[in-house]
Amino acid sequence: TQLLEQSPQFLSIQEGENLTVYCNSSSVFSSLQWYRQEPGEGPVLLVTVVTGGEVKKLKRLTFQFGDARKDSSLHITAAQPGDTGLYLCAGVGGNNRLAFGKGNQVVVIP
Amino acid sequence: DVKVTQSSRYLVKRTGEKVFLECVQDMDHENMFWYRQDPGLGLRLIYFSYDVKMKEKGDIPEGYSVSREKKERFSLILESASTNQTSMYLCASSLSLIYTEAFFGQGTRLTVV
């Protein structure tokens, strides 16, 4: 089982601040996905990164895939209360299965 | 709009009962998955299916079985529910096993008493 470690596990910030969360592994992934899950709902895909070094932007969210395709980061600029949620990274490894990290719980305080 | 629908949002069952969790997708996806989500443990794959009547064990299949008689429907069965199966159960579907998005249902919170 390829392990995806997400850090920090929990992060609470004020509205307007910036934040970065991380997803790390010792394994190489053919692609990494980031999902956001709101309370009582299923996860929803935000982005998929495929190429090492790739950077993708989704409004105030910036996703980066590490050069070696073992890690990824999510940066949120000027966080809003609507960004509150559990951010999950998921990677497709050599067994062709999608494995999830435990998530980064982000709380943005108005 | 794509949709994965789980039959119940909340279920309470007694220890020893046989429990069926149903999931239906309307996207004609080949692949369907059952996960359970627990605090501190994240999402763990129970079973997945890549075609009708085909199934493969995930990371934690013990105590569970699945059925996929039709492409759009994937059922998770708890043969004899136990309290350690109290959890959030999430169904998902995807077009292929790799690269493509997994679409999730809203989840079923199962409590076994």
Image (cartoon, rainbow, N blue to C red):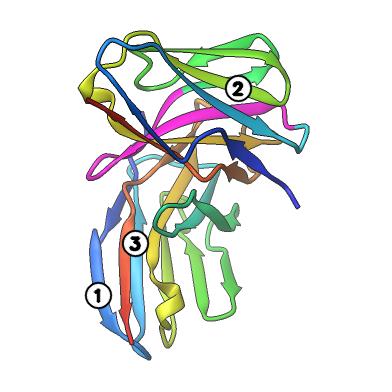
Q: Amino acid at mark 2?
A: Phe
Q: Which residue is tagged 3?
A: A22
* Dot 3 alpha-carbon crowd within 10 angstroms: few under 14, some 14 to 19, many 20 or more: many
Q: Is residue B97 above or below residue A56?
A: above
Residue A71 falls in image quadrant: bottom left
**Residue B73 part of the magenta segment:** no
**Residue B37 part of the magenta segment:** yes
Residues tagged 1 and 2 counted as in contact (Cβ below 8 A): no
Q: Main secondary structure of the magenta part?
A: strand
Of circles 2 and 3, the one toward us is: 2
Q: Residue at x 51, y 73 (%)?
A: A62
Which label sits on residue A12?
Answer: 1
**The C terminus of chain A lies in quadrant:** bottom left
* Dot 2 alpha-carbon crowd within 10 angstroms: few under 14, some 14 to 19, many 20 or more: many
Of circles 1 and 2, the one toward us is: 2
Numbered disc 2: what chain?
B
In the image, taking residue B111 as reference, residue A31 lies left or right, namely right
Q: Which residue range is magenta in the image?
A: B29-46
Q: Which residue is tagged 2?
A: B74
Q: Is residue A85 above or below residue A3?
A: below
